[in-house]
Amino acid sequence: MIRIPSAGGYEKLVYTTLPECGYTKGVNIEQQEISDSDCVVVETYACGVNYADIIIRWGLYKSATDFVGWPITPGFEFSGTIKSVGQNVKDFIVGDKVAGLTCFGAYTTCIKAPAYMIRKVPSNVSMSTAAGFLTVAATAYYAAFELCKLRVTDSVLVHSAAGGVGSMLCQMLRNAGCNVVGVVGATHKVEAAKNLGCLSVIDKSVHNLWEEAKKIAPNGYAAIFDANGVETLKDSYNHVKPGGRLISYGSATLFPRSTKTSNGELSTYNWLKLVWNYKNRTVFDPMEMTSSNKSVMAFNLSFMFGEKELIKECLDILFKWISEGSIKLDNITEYSLRDVANAHRDLESGNSVGKIVLLTRDENSKNVE
């Protein structure tokens, strides 16, 4: 497993061998007082890497500091084979290939998880896909369908359209009949965004983002999905039409995309920029929002693992969609668990497309070194 003893750079991603019969577990098991009888133990095949994991390593992810502290094993999603089942578990048996969510603890070779937070992996879905799609798909699903009520032909704008959550949002919104406008930060990501269902793609490395957005939807957007935060949040709000919603699910531009130091630590410059960005973050006025008929909604799913019925419904729908092929995770970059530092470096660069996963086992259930 990977343990982070304290905040810092890549050297803090410490590979540790689990003791015999050992496992990690999500913090929600104790928070919700979930019995061992209602859990399964999974020998993992892979786990997904998310930008939140990097923020955790820097010591700046609120749910991690609130719920766990140091040391911490990061990771929200995994796939693998069931090693043992609790006596109350009826839907799974030893040997089942499964994937699931966890409130931290997924960077590991063996994990305990509540049975309601896992599902069987469909035969037409790879174990890497199963490990990599859940967090981003669950985030996209909640943003698009729990927080929004969109109509067919509504124009919507998705920032970071070729990234993890963005790629899922584009597919889900396209399937719902929306006119999807995707925003990407580099030319090599344009084609990927088009393949995800975007009718229009704005390459902000070439064009003025908001001039192009205005041309495409002069009357504004029914919804704008923004995980950038400080860099785009105000302009995103200004381009929401009356009756529309700005959905905020992250603050990526608050943090550096590539650190100035070679070891992944935040430099003095990074800290100064972070403080400046935080002090100058967008603040919304409820009175202005009322007269403009606009809403701003924000969320972080890591604070919502206690919502059992929501999690169950979300997993049922997502596994149905991934099995049917209505959502896909086409661009997957694989690293071994021991190579987690390079996986973080790749994601921090901002150049990656799609999803990064860490392989913990090969097809013969041997440890990936």
Image (cartoon, rainbow, N blue to C red):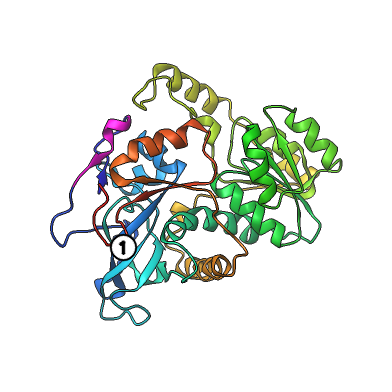
Percent of width and height locating residue 197: 70, 52
Q: Is residue 234 left or right of residue 364?
A: right
Compared with 334, 317 (above or below) is: below
Q: Write down the quadrant of residue 19 in the picture.
A: bottom left
Q: Is residue 40 left or right of residue 252?
A: left
Work out which residue is located at the far top of the displayed protein and give it: 269
| Pick the front one: 71 or 188 | 188
Identify the residue under disc 1.
Answer: 29
Percent of width and height locating residue 69: 29, 43
10 magenta-colored: yes
366 magenta-colored: no
Percent of width and height locating residue 287: 73, 41
Q: Write down the quadrant of residue 139 in the picture.
A: bottom right
| Pick the front one: 142 or 162 | 162
| Pick the front one: 177 or 295 | 177
Q: In this view, does 276 lie to the left or right of 117?
A: right
Q: What stretch is highlighted in magenta?
A: 9-16
Q: Which residue is drawn at 38% across and 80% down?
A: 91
**Label 1 is placed on what type of residue?**
Ile
Q: Which residue is drawn at 79% across and 34% down?
A: 212
Where disc 1 sits, the SS reads helix
